Image (cartoon, rainbow, N blue to C red):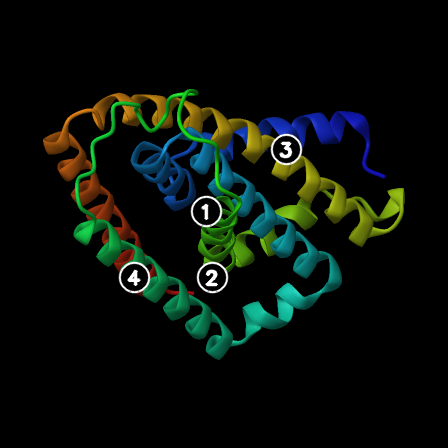
Amino acid sequence: MPAIDTLIAFFGVAVLLALSPGPDNLFVLVQSAQRGWRLGMCVVVGLCLGILVHTTAVALGLAAVLAASSTAFTVLKWCGAAYLAWLAWGALRAPSQVSDTPVGSSAAQPLQLREALRMVGRGVVMNITNPKVLIFFLAFLPQFADPARGSVAWQIACFGAVFVLATFLVFGAIACFSGVFGGLLQRSARTQWWLNRLAGVVFLGLAVRLATTQR
């Protein structure tokens, strides 16, 4: 088990990393503005589940195998880029549908389980198809592990859980703020049209960035 002071220091670093501009928090920002804070939180849950997948891969030694394979890196990269391009196409073609109740309002219709699971899935796919995240975790998490304090794999799992907590808090705040603000913007059909196109451009930019990523 890692020392408490190490966990606290790691939590602070994780919060700073979550706050730094990147594809994941930008993805949360856009999805929440476009679909509301509740579906934005579903994306956050999906991203956190993706972090757990990466953490497990590092703890079990699978990440080192994947990171050493240029083929695996390329396949993951192109799968993620293709998925983001598909989201961009959907956002660019999305019609403007103005409702009397803003998307981010608490008075909106109850969240549908199918839609919620779909957004969780988006977060998971967004995270696990980015090989840079896996390589980052492979290099980052073991730095805080101390073999003198027991199983390194267990310590890495603990650090991964702390990273998930920090990510959930920071990304959750982004989702709530962006969702409520986006709900206000979507009262206007014209503004909603521009918001959908902005989302499409952002997704397309993320796709190009991922596709051109080098090891």
* Amino acid type at image mark 4: Trp
Q: Which residue is mark 1?
A: 115
Q: Which residue is mark 2?
A: 129
Q: Residue at x 41, y 20 (%)?
A: 107
Mark-to-mark CA distance, 3 and 1: 24 Å
**Residue 134 location in percent, x, y?**
55, 57
Instruction: Give the mark, 1 or 2, whose residue is nearer the N terminus.
Output: 1
Mark-to-mark CA distance, 1 and 2: 21 Å
Locate residue 182 relative to residue 214 in the image: left or right: left
**Residue 111 location in percent, x, y?**
48, 36
- Kindly state the secondary structure of the residue where label 1 is placed: helix
Q: Residue at x 35, y 40 (%)?
A: 31
The quadrant holding residue 97 is top left
* Amino acid type at image mark 1: Glu
- Kindly state the secondary structure of the residue where label 2 is placed: loop
Instruction: Give the mark, 4 or 2, whose residue is nearer the N terminus.
Output: 4
Mark-to-mark CA distance, 1 and 4: 17 Å
Marks 1 and 4: CB-CB under 8 Å? no
Q: Which mark is residue 165?
A: 3
Q: Residue at x 88, y 45 (%)?
A: 148
| In front: label 1 or label 2 | 1
The quadrant holding residue 32 is top left
Q: Is residue 143 above or below residue 189?
A: below
* Amino acid type at image mark 2: Thr
Mark-to-mark CA distance, 2 and 3: 21 Å
Instruction: Give the mark, 3 or 1, whose residue is nearer the N terminus.
Output: 1
Residue 113 visible, this angle: yes
Locate residue 188 relative to residue 209 in the image: left or right: left
